[in-house]
Image (cartoon, grey):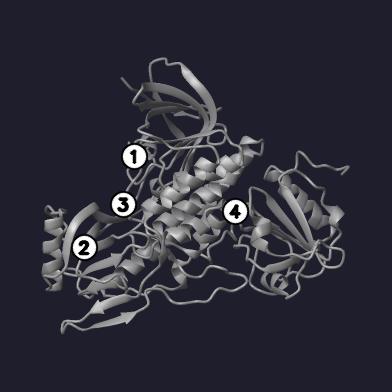
Amino acid sequence: MCILHIVFGSHSIHSNVCILHISEPDMTVNRSIDVLICGAGAAGLTLAIDLARRGVRFRLIEKLDAPFHGSRGKGIQPRSQEIFEDLGLLDRLVAAGGVYPPQREYRADGGYDESPVMTQEDPTPAEPYRLPLMVPQFLTEGVMRERLAELGHRPEFGCELVGFQQDADGVTARLRGAAGDEAVRARYLIGADGGRSFVRHALDIGFPGKTLGVRAVVADVELTGLDREAWHRFNGDSMEVQIGLCPLAGTDLFQLQAPVPLEGDVDLSAQGLTEMVAARTGRDDIRIHAVSWASAYNMNARLADRYRMGRVLLMGDAAHTHPPTGGQGLNTSVQDAYNLGWKLAAVVAGAPEALLDSYEAERRPIAAGMLGLSTKLLDGLKRGEMRRGREVHQLDLGYQESSLALERLSREGALRAGDRAPDAPIRGAAGQRQRLFELFKGAHWTLLGHDVRRDVVAPRAGLRIHTLGAGGDLFDDDGHCRAAYGLQSGSWVLVRPDGYIGAFVGETEEDIEALRAYLRAVGLGAKELCDA
């Protein structure tokens, strides 16, 4: 039987925090790992891939016996596409899915109007991806599991976290699977276990917000009677009878979306959904023959009071839950994991543990903003407004107020420390064309200088140094790099492993010393190769 203890002051960094411990009878701890990830959805898989490529010891567990098989989070925003490029799976995702079709809004007279769902924007050198992709969530997660397998790891399905206790050095977790119970010791526990998160509940972390007064059905169905060239929408200006049927790229399925009454049962069978379609469209030629997955749910907007308690951290839907409008939920979750991954790896390798505090400081305000945007778009949907633009792309999000944003230059242009690092075409000294994103790709930091002395910053593990200009290893023939970053002669820009700008500094001794202090704070100071 579980015994609950409320313990005060059990962690040196959070000495004034109440931490919940779940104690179990003595069990043999089978093995020790660095990180235990609870939840193998998109957030958990992203973190697992990032930790795997960094050589961090982890386990990824999922209480479900098999992978999720619904289309739920089908939109991959441009910023997430950049992340997936870095993680080595973007081309596979594009091949698995496709672009959004136009929306076809049917009128009462039987005619219809067609228009793009997404504002069309051409790629630029700084922003190579400017159009959301449609990839059903089960296909996205399948591609991610494939990438994780290439890195030597797999999710453990049918393995449930049923209790844990933490102390100053780590977490002891009790897992339950087909072979029985086991105890595992980890330095950190990550709760990526969804909106009903066991981890969040066990820690008694508040999840304030509101139910938005909208209940909806989403279902993946096989149907006849509609072509696959458009997202078919009926009665868009009425929340009582509107319905949408969207062909799911990469499949033979359609995704049905429809608001339903707040109370009462909903028939999610093929017959029941066929009757709903007929009642709302006035057509009897649209027939649903099979239902692959279906759910009736209430829309909520909620945000966890905190993302970290001692050695336990929350991410994804465990930390925030959104209405589906705007396709922000899965993307925000992926970016949580991408922010946390390099920080966990750095701390495991010896960086100051305070680095983990920047995770909540950076990501929680982003989630709060996304909740506001999703709710605003839901209000627009109630009025029949569907078109999406740059506001959903997540390219303009950043961390300018972060403790990890070091700005020591006065420069022209809007780019600042904490902003997303733009892409740009460049040429290597050996003559080959490449992109900045290719230089950034991987688990390292990148330091880029313009007309600087390369030797003022000592080489060290985890940092790659490049210089532009006379005697440099890179050339900015078309000026795109200088234009994007506002680089002047004698300036340096430091790019974080997650593709955000960590620092802009000059070449004065004070600036270089500030840069060295920054590098030490993120775990890149202990192994300087001063005599290299």
Residue 340 - label: none
- Badge 2 is on which residue? 223
The residue lying toward the viewer, choosing from 65 and 307, is 65
As helix, strand or loop, the secondary structure at mark 2 comes to strand
Query: In the picture shown, does residue 161 fall above or below 132?
Result: above
> Residue sitting at 77 percent across and 49 percent down?
516
The residue lying toward the viewer, choosing from 117 and 456, is 117
Say if mark 2 contacts mark 3, CB within 8 Å. no
Where is residue 263 shown, x and y percent of the image? 13, 55
State the quadrant of the C terminus. top right
Say if mark 4 contacts mark 3, CB within 8 Å. no
Task: Count residues near mark 3 (Cα–Cα under 10 Å), then give few for <14, some for 14-19, many for 20+.
Answer: some
Where is residue 411 shown, x and y percent of the image? 72, 71
- Badge 3 is on which residue? 70
Q: Pick whichever of labels 4 and 1 is earlier in the sequence.
A: 1
Report whether residue 469 is seen: yes
The residue lying toward the viewer, choosing from 325 and 274, is 274
Task: Count residues near mark 1 (Cα–Cα under 10 Å), then give few for <14, some for 14-19, many for 20+.
Answer: few
Given the image, on which type of amino acid does mark 4 rest?
A: Asp
Q: CA distance from mark 2 to mark 4?
A: 42 Å
Mark nearer the viewer, 4 or 3? 3
- Badge 4 is on which residue? 498
Quadrant hosting residue 400: bottom right
Task: Count residues near mark 4 (Cα–Cα under 10 Å), then give few for <14, some for 14-19, many for 20+.
Answer: many
As helix, strand or loop, the secondary structure at mark 4 comes to loop
Q: CA distance from mark 3 to mark 1?
A: 12 Å
Mark nearer the viewer, 4 or 1? 1
